[in-house]
Amino acid sequence: MGGIESEVGIFWTYEGKLFHIESAPLSQGVKTMVGIDYAVGHYATWFMMAKRGILDRLPYALRDEYDSISRGRVVYLFKREAFVIYHGDDFNDAILDELLKTLHLPPDATYDEVDEHYNPLPDDFVF
């Protein structure tokens, strides 16, 4: 890894591409009972992205809610001694490769797993 620290974080994907990443070095992550996570959630980050103009790259109808497009989270799990990328269905090898590179993740100790939580809510979803 050449001395560069791996990172944990959150991200969004749109139309089969990585849309946006927010991350921090592993040493600055939040230690939990099971691993190390990024300190800020998707909900709060979405508002900051709006203020910074990042959401302007999305169609207007998708800018209101943080769960309008697929998203994901990169964590480090103590028990597995590995990073796990939790993501929705809009995920592919190109996104994986970009996350590995951008977050300096070790390919031999990084796994990706689909988690339905990270998919957008269906249009007909009712609370």
Image: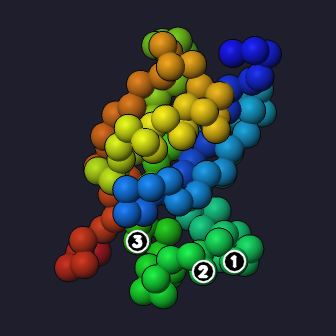
Q: Nearer the viewer, mark 3 or mark 2?
A: 2
Disc 1 marks which amino acid? Answer: Gly
Residue 110 circle label: none
In the displayed structure image, the side of residue 78 where residue 124 appears, left or right: left
Q: Considering only vertical position in the picture, is 16 above or below 123?
A: above
Tag 2 secondary structure: helix
Residue, x 36% and y 47% (percent of image)?
91
Q: Residue furthest left?
A: 124
How much space separates mark 2 and mark 1, taking CA atoms? Answer: 5 Å
Tag 3 secondary structure: loop
- Confirm whether residue 48 shows in the render: yes
Work out which quarter of the rendered image holds the C terminus and state it: bottom left
Disc 2 marks which amino acid? Answer: Asp
Total labels drawn: 3
Disc 3 marks which amino acid? Answer: Ser
Quadrant for residue 31, please give it.
top right
